[in-house]
Image (tube, helix red, strand yellow):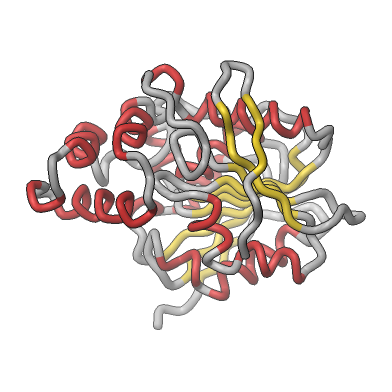
Amino acid sequence: MSAAARRFVASDGVGLAWYAWGEATQLPPVVLQHGYAASSALNWSATGVVGALLDAGRRVIAVDARGHGQSDKPGAADCYGEARMAQDLAELLAALQIGEFDLFGYSMGAVIGLLLASDHPGVRRLVVGGVGEGVIACGGVDRRVLPMEVLIAALRAPSVAQIAEPAAQAFRVFAEYAGNDLAALALQASRMHSTPLALQRVSAPTLVIAGQSDPLARQPHQLADALPQARWVTLAGDHLSLLRNTRFIEESLSFLNAAATVAPAAAQEPSP
């Protein structure tokens, strides 16, 4: 479900593309933040997440992170990093005069969501997908699966054929498919968040969703246990296919539309 990109200029002058669907309701808007090398269109519109949220009566806002989608791609490494991207979200929401909102982040977007939720009182409910214990061990996306120097070399390689490491080659293929700027993605990879997150300060009820076959989201229960008020669920899928699992959308919607406080719990979808 497409929407025309709107323009917002962050405090450091970087232009960001953002999108809005639906009308204001009694529930706060749902803010979506996509993953690394993806975009709002790829992670949220094409997978049916936006459509499902609209069908459930929610207003939806999504942002292309700097270096991604239709947002600016600055050429300096210090313009990147998930902390800066979390600040971008906070600035946009302040400009839109949105005080309370639900936040839904995937992969890199999950790290952005956790950073924002640890510092922003307006987060009512938080869903983080595509991450697990690696957030605790690495301070962000699990770099043990694919070291950033290997990923950066793959993004800067003259062609896919010259990339030997399979996971790095897969990321390069996905980045090209998504139409993203390889140089900007390499700069973001050099600035991936790597210091401990203040997970204890995330007061919003949180749902952690991980694919059973996702190496970047192993042991999601450990991440849920580190959050003050969280539950976790694993579903069939890997890092890319999880977003198209109908249960992924159903679990997220059920959680975001709930009003009560979440008690810690765990659930697991039977393996197919």
Q: Residue visible at 73% across and 48% down?
A: 102
Q: Residue furthest bottom?
A: 272
Q: Is residue 256 visible?
A: yes
Where residue 125 appears, as percent x and y from the top left, is 73, 48
Quadrant for the C terminus in the image: bottom left
Q: Position of residue 243 (x, y in %)?
A: 49, 64
Query: Image quarter for residue 94?
Result: top right
Q: Is residue 230 visible?
A: no
Viewer-side residue, 56 vs 134: 56
Taking the spot 82% from the left edge, 40% from the top edge, the residue there is 100
Q: Position of residue 68 (x, y in %)?
A: 45, 40
Count of all numbered marks drawn on residues in the image: 0
Above or below, comparing residue 15 to residue 107 in the picture: above
| Residue 147, image x, y percentages | 23, 37
30 on left or right of 49: right
| 265 lies above or below 226 | below
Q: Does residue 229 lie above or below 189 as drawn?
A: below
Is 34 on the left or on the right of 168, as rendered? right
User: Foreground: 254 or 63?
Assistant: 63
**Quarter containing the N terminus:** bottom right
Camera-side residue of 221 and 164: 164
Considering every residue shown, the one lying at the far right of the view is: 26
Viewer-proximal residue, 248 or 59?
Answer: 59
Residue extending farthest front:
4
Q: Is residue 104 above or below residue 140?
A: below
When asked about the image quadrant of residue 73, the answer is top left
Q: Is residue 189 left or right of residue 100?
A: left
- Residue at x-position 92% and y-position 55%: 26
